[in-house]
Amino acid sequence: FETLTLCPIDTRCIEPALLRADEARWLDDYHATVRARLAPHLSGAALAWLNTRTEAL
């Protein structure tokens, strides 16, 4: 499928130990893409929030 919107997935409701390696890698890759595309448009508290919400598992 094609990603139409870029928004961090809330990992607070995910138990990383239950993810397969490929699922964790997909989530980390997705968050890296979200951060790379959105970070240049943000600053201050919004950028800090984005960086926190897109941290690698």
Image (tube, grey):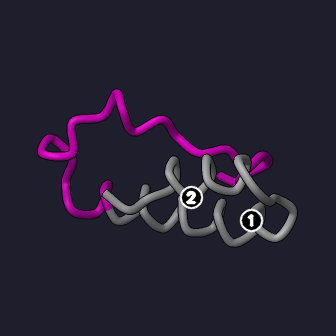
What's the distance in space between the residues labelled 1 and 2, CA to CA?
Answer: 8 Å
Does the residue at mark 1 contact the one at mark 2 (Cβ under 8 Å)?
Answer: yes
- Percent x, y of residue 14: 30, 34
Say what secondary structure mark 2 lies in. helix
Residue 19 appears at what percent x and percent y?
Answer: 21, 47
Q: Is residue 24 left or right of residue 31?
A: left
Location of mark 2 (residue) = 51
For the point 69% across and 72% down, the residue is 36
Q: Tell me the residue that label 1 is attached to.
A: 39
Picture quadrant where residue 24 is located: bottom left
x and y, in percent, of residue 2 in the image: 71, 55
Q: Residue at x 21, y 62 (%)?
A: 21
In the foreground, 6 or 52: 52
Secondary element type, mark 1: helix
Q: Which residues are magenta?
A: 1-24
> Does 23 appear in magenta?
yes
Question: Dot 2 surroundings within 10 Å: few (below 14), some, or many (20 or more)?
Answer: some
Q: Which residue is situated farthest in the right direction here?
A: 41
**Name of the residue lying farthest toward the left:** 17
Q: Position of residue 40 (x, y in %)?
A: 82, 70
